[in-house]
Image: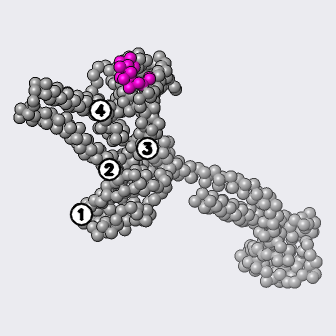
């Protein structure tokens, strides 16, 4: 557009220059023609008057002809057309001039004039003839350059003027083009900046009055469009944020199962790179773990279908829901739900129920058996009755203790604090527990070795004591006679490490992951011989979690076990 306007203005300027030059040349030539005729009229009047006053007209004409030689031609023609006097040519060689137009006109009307072009001289000849009183004709003639010769004589000056005018025209065309396009450019800039940080909507730029309604309308429409875009963008971001933060995998496909939308969780399940663009890809080729035949059989049924599938160590539930838009089948929605933890918890619940039933059945069976003996009077002496009563009392205490531990674990799992958190020094607790267990240590001939740094954590002293008691008790309980238990406390990288290592029977590698479950005992052969509910390490795990700690276990069968508990140091917790 800029080039076309520029070239149009430039062509217009050149055309105007050409027309101006032609008009100027014609005006100058026409002015010269009028000037020549005026000169001839004046000269004829003067000479006619002079001829009347002189005695010898021929001599007067000869003198005048000599004076005007080269400027004006004087011809005196007789009444019959023969030449009486000629100032520029040989009159004897000249033809009869009676038929000349100006002569004929002078004979008839007293005066005559004519203009003739000389192709050989490239000049224009101006003639003026007057009939004298004696019937003769006085003709004066002037030579002037033709329009063509006049134009050629002015050509160098015209070319110079043309060059200067052309430069001025080019400059003026550029300035006019810039001036004409400036309001349009400002308008285009506003259109480009709509929706950008430099958005200046609502401010109509200085444009041509004819464009102002259009520009204002565009700006008003841009306000509406931009508001709509912002609303859609906000909604899209909210939906994207919800999709990306869903714990379930979500995949939307078209009716032919080409992927339209997929969230990050679904990509993880399908083991796809997070930055991989999968839109438009065929889902069955990427997702081979499910039964596609069942999905295709369901077709466009509005009812959702479900199926389970396993990937590596995880179990998933897939929900397939057809999607309709305006009663038209739009696509298929796939929802992937990781139910591994749910199934594990359900399995743990079943195992817990079974374990509780088993653990409670043993003391209850004993109590019922002894009670039946007493009730039937099947004892022989008072000592037997006392013995049976004592066994019932022991089993009842065991039963109550087990129930109390279950309730205690339940309270810990519900994160109920027995008292407010405080700074707790672990070294005195470990020393107190080791001192408290000395009778058991002497009985089993087990030695406890303590390497204790003075460390402090933020927590519940009573529950931290339970952690130490359970760890040391297990290390002693599952140890061999004459074995050793090593307890250490130290601080590393702003964390407090409590390690309890024994030289006992160890834990089989395939059972180490389950030792923190309720009622679980790793070595069944020893479990019947060793008293305990199987809740100790489960209680320890929950207490450690409540104190933002971590617990790990390393063990080798018949070589011993090491349990490491890590807590945040006190200064970090309150720093």
Looking at the rendered image, the disc whose residue lies closer to the viewer, 3 or 2, is 3
Q: Are marks 4 and 3 in contact (CB under 8 Å)?
A: no
On the image, the x and y values in percent for residue 258 come to: 40, 64
Span shown in magenta: 433-448
Q: What residue would you read off at disc 2?
A: 339
On the image, the x and y values in percent for residue 321 come to: 28, 60
On the image, the x and y values in percent for residue 549 come to: 41, 30
Is 159 rendered above or below residue 379? below
Chief secondary structure of the magenta span? Answer: helix
Q: Which is more N-terminal, label 2 or label 4?
A: 2
Of 510 and 220, nearer the camera is 510
Q: Are marks 3 and 2 in contact (CB under 8 Å)?
A: no
Q: What residue would you read off at disc 1?
A: 302
Q: Which is more N-terminal, label 2 or label 3?
A: 2
Does residue 279 appear in the picture of this structure?
A: yes
Identify the residue at the far left of this view: 376
């Amino acid at each position: 557009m800029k080039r076309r306007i520029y070239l149009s203005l430039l062509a217009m300027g050149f055309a105007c220059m050409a027309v101006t030059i032609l008009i100027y040349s014609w005006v100058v030539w026409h002015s010269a023609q009028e000037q020549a005729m005026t000169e001839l009229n004046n000269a004829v009047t003067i000479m006619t008057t002079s001829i009347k006053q002189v005695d010898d007209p021929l001599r007067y004409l000869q003198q005048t002809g000599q004076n005007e030689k080269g400027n004006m031609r004087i011809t005196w023609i007789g009444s019959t057309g023969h030449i009486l006097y000629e100032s520029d040519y040989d009159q004897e060689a000249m033809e009869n001039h009676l038929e000349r137009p100006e002569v004929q006109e002078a004979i008839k009307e007293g005066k005559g004039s004519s203009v003739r072009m000389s192709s050989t001289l490239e000049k224009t000849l101006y003639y003026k003839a007057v009939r004298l009183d004696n019937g003769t004709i006085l003709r004066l003639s002037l030579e002037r350059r033709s329009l063509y010769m006049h134009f050629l004589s002015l050509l160098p000056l015209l070319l110079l003027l043309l060059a200067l005018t052309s430069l001025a025209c080019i400059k003026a065309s550029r300035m006019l083009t810039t001036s004409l396009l400036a309001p349009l450019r400002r308008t285009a800039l506003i259109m480009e900046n709509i929706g950008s940080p430099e958005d200046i909507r609502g401010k109509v730029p200085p444009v041509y009055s004819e464009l102002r309604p259009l520009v204002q309308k565009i700006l008003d429409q841009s306000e509406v469009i931009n508001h709509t875009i912002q609303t859609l963008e906000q909604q899209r971001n909210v939906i994207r944020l919800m999709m990306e933060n869903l714990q379930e995998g979500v995949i939307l496909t078209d009716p032919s199962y080409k992927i339209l939308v997929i969230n990050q969780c679904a990509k993880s399940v399908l083991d796809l790179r997070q930055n991989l663009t999968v839109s438009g890809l065929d889902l069955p080729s990427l997702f081979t773990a499910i039964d596609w035949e069942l999905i295709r059989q369901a077709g466009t049924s509005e009812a959702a279908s479900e199926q389970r599938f396993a990937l590596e160590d995880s179990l998933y539930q897939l929900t397939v829901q057809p999607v309709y838009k305006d009663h038209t089948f739009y696509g298929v929605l796939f929802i992937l739900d990781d139910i591994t933890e749910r199934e594990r918890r359900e399995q743990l619940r079943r195992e817990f129920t079974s374990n509780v039933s088993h653990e409670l059945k043993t003391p209850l069976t004993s109590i019922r058996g002894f009670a039946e003996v007493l009730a039937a009077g099947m004892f022989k002496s008072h000592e037997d009755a006392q013995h049976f009563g004592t066994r019932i009392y022991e089993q009842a205490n065991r039963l109550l203790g087990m129930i109390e531990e279950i309730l205690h674990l339940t309270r810990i799992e519900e994160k109920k604090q027995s008292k407010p958190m405080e700074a707790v020094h672990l070294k005195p607790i470990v020393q107190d527990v080791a001192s408290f267990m000395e009778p058991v240590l002497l009985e089993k001939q087990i030695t406890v070795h303590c390497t204790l740094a003075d460390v402090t954590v933020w927590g519940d002293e009573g529950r931290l004591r339970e952690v130490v008691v359970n760890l040391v008790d297990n290390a002693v309980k599952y140890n061999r006679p004459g074995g050793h238990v090593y307890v250490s406390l130290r601080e590393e990288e702003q964390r407090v490490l409590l390690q309890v290592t024994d030289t006992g029977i160890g834990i089989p590698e395939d059972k180490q992951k389950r030792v923190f479950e309720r009622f679980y005992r790793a070595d069944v052969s020893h479990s019947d011989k060793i008293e305990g509910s199987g809740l100790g390490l489960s209680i320890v795990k929950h207490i450690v979690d409540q104190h933002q700690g971590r617990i790990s276990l390393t063990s080798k069968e018949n070589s011993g076990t090491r349990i490491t508990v890590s807590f945040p140091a006190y200064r970090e917790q309150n720093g």
